Image (cartoon, rainbow, N blue to C red):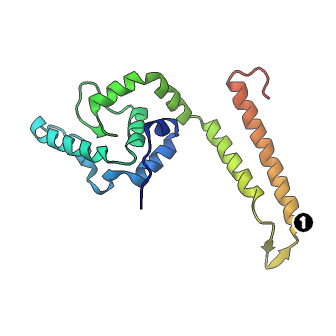
């Protein structure tokens, strides 16, 4: 089975949940003790440097390295003067430098991660699609319900979802500063 490699451009445009799912499903480090990627309290450079090098080698061949790096940047991991972590193929100071260099983009990404209205809109649209393609053949209490009755009920639910979607879109557009929500 060939695993798809996630590019850094793709990772930058995905939301936090999708990034985390990609890392959970395809990270090269899943078979390694996660502690190998973190410096222990009081650990000397002589002990840490070989473990850090091994962790960086693991990250170098990881198909979801870009997603892992993006999650680390969005979470604010790594510090300029603290070599205590390896994440997404970068050390703590490298993560801090990348975060500083990409501060504006990361602020937008973190805001998008917090966009609960957008998530609600996505959920409503998914529910509407699932309902619209659902079968109209149903059985209730062991008796077959006529398709026309089920279709009427289904249409009413779709209309309700359409109304909620319109309201959510209008609210988001108004919040974004549109004078007249289209």
Where does the image place residue 144, in percent across and percent down from the top left?
84, 76
Residue ranking furthest to the left: 46
Where does the image place residue 18, in percent across and percent down from the top left?
51, 46
Residue ranking furthest to the front: 2
Give the left or right position of residue 166, taking residue 103 as reference.
right
Mark 1, residues whose alpha carbon is within 10 Å: few (<14), some, or many (≥20)?
A: few
Q: Nearer the viewer, residue 127 or 7?
A: 7
Residue 149 occupies which quadrant of the picture?
A: bottom right
Give the left or right position of residue 121, taking residue 1 as reference.
right
At x 48%, y 22%, the residue is 104
At x 24%, y 25%, the residue is 81
Residue 48 occupies which quadrant of the picture?
A: top left
Where does the image place residue 13, in percent across and percent down from the top left?
52, 36
Give the left or right position of residue 54, taking residue 177 as reference.
left
Query: What residue did someone put label 1 on?
Result: 148
At x 15%, y 42%, the residue is 50
Q: In this picture, is 23 found above or below 175? A: below
Where does the image place residue 182, in percent across and percent down from the top left?
79, 29
Residue ranking furthest to the bottom: 142
Residue 114 occupies which quadrant of the picture?
A: top right
Q: Nearer the viewer, residue 45 or 156?
A: 45
Q: What secondary structure is marked by label 1?
A: helix
At x 27%, y 47%, the residue is 58
Q: Nearer the viewer, residue 70 or 152?
A: 70
Quadrant location of the N terminus? bottom left
Q: In this picture, is 57 found above or below 31? A: above
């Amino acid at each position: 089975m060939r695993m798809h490699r996630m590019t850094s451009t793709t990772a930058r445009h995905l939301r936090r949940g999708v990034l985390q799912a990609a890392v959970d499903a395809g990270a090269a480090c899943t078979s390694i003790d996660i502690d190998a990627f973190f410096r222990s309290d009081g650990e000397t450079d002589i002990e840490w440097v070989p473990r850090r090098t091994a962790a960086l080698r693991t990250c170098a061949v990881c198909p979801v390295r870009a997603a892992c790096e993006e999650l680390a940047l969005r979470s604010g991991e790594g510090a300029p003067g603290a070599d205590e972590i390896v994440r997404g193929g970068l050390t703590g100071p490298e993560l801090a430098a990348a975060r500083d260099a990409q501060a504006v983009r990361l602020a937008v990404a973190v805001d998008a991660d917090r966009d609960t209205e957008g998530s609600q809109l996505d959920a409503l649209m998914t529910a509407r699609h699932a309902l619209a393609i659902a079968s109209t053949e149903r059985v209730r209490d062991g008796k077959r319900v006529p398709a026309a009755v089920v279709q009427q009920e289904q249409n009413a639910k779709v209309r309700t979802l359409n109304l909620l979607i319109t309201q959510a879109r209008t609210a988001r557009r108004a919040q974004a500063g549109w004078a007249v929500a289209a």
